[in-house]
Amino acid sequence: MTKNSENNIKFMCIIPAAGKSSRFKKGNKLFEYIYENEDVLSRTIKNITDIKDFDEVFVGLNPKDINFSKAYLGNIDNVTFYAGGESRQKTVLNGLDCVKKLDIDDIDNTWVIIHDAARPSISSQDIIEFMVTVLKLNKSSIMAIPVSDTIKKVDKNNNIIKTNSRDEMWLAQTPQMFRFGILYNSLKHCVSNKINVTDESQAIEILGHECAVVRGKPYNIKITEDIDLNHARALAGDLSISMNNFSEECIARSKSYKEEEESND
C-alpha cells in the first residue's frame, strides 16, 4: 500500500501490551518463544513494522516491566514504547495521547490501527489488505470472522438455557482501524464515565458511531492459553512441536479419545 501524499493521510499503530496474562498460567505470554529466537511480542511488532506506511508505531507496556521490556526488545526504528494503564482502554488512550503529542497538523486525517500484541499469526500483507479495504469504506472498521459453530447460552452451572441464532454473529479480531478523533473521544468518554469495554469498537458503538466488519482470517488467533501458543508456533513454521510440548489438558484429551476408540473396537 502506498500513501497518497496529496491527501496527507497518516497512519499510526498502537499495540497494547500491558496486560497481566492472567489466563495464561506460565507468566507473560508475550515473551514466550514462538519461532526460532523470536517471541510473541517481537513477532507481532515485526509484522507491523514491515508495513512501511505506518508513520509511527506505539507499544504500550506494563509500567512495572517497562524498563525490562525496553531493554529486552531493544531499539526498533519508528517504534516508541510507553507506559500502559491498568486496563486495555487506558493503555490505548495513553497511546492516543502519545499520538496527540506529535502535534500533527491534520489530526482529522490520521487513521489509528489498534492491534493485539497477542496476535502474532496474521501477516503484514493481511493487515495491508485490511487497511486498503477500510480506506475504501471510509469508516471505522474491524477485522472479524462470522460465527460458524452453534451458540449456546448457559447458566452459572453450565446448564444450557437456550440456543442463540448465529446468523448475525461475528467474532471480533484485530486490527481495528478508526479516525483519530472518533477513537480518542470515544475512549475518553468510556474512561471518564468508568465504562469498561473489551475492544475499541465497543467504545465507538457507545457514542453511536458506525463501524463495519471486514472479514478476517481464521488463523488470526489470539494467544490466551497454552494451546493457543502451540497453534501460533505451528503457524509460525515450527513443525517440530512434539506431544510433550502440549498442555496437560491436550494430552489428557488425546488419551481420552484413544481409550474411547479402543473401547469401541
Image (cartoon, grey):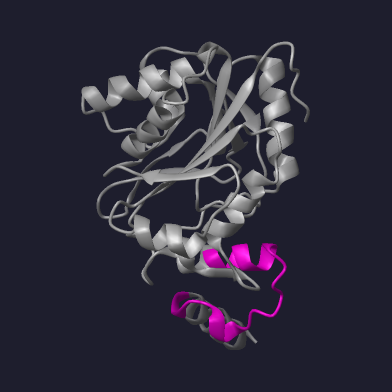
Asked if one can make out residue 6 in the rendered structure from this viewpoint, the answer is yes
* Residue 77 at x, y percent in the picture: 60, 47
Q: Residue at x 59, y 16 (%)?
A: 139
Q: Give whichever of 121, 248 is nearer the camera.
A: 121
Q: How many marks?
A: 0
Left or right? Give the position of 259 relative to 19: right
Asked if 181 appears above or below 221 in the picture, the reply is above
Q: Residue at x 61, y 82 (%)?
A: 261
* Residue 198 at x, y percent in the picture: 37, 37
- State which quarter of the image contains the C terminus: bottom right
Asked if 92 appears above or below 264 in the picture, the reply is above
Residue extending farthest to the right is 2
Asked if one can make out residue 218 in the rendered structure from this viewpoint, the answer is no
Asked if 157 appears above or below 253 in the picture, the reply is above
* Residue 163 at x, y percent in the picture: 44, 40
Q: Residue at x 60, y 65 (%)?
A: 231
Q: Give whichever of 124, 65 is nearer the camera.
A: 65
Q: Residue at x 36, y 31 (%)?
A: 93
Q: Which residues are magenta?
A: 229-249
Asked whether residue 88 is drawn in magenta, I would say: no
Question: Residue 52 falls in which quadrant of the image?
Answer: top right
* Residue 242 at x, y percent in the picture: 63, 83
Asked whether residue 234 is drawn in magenta, I would say: yes
Question: Residue 71 falls in which quadrant of the image?
Answer: bottom left
- State which quarter of the image contains the N terminus: top right
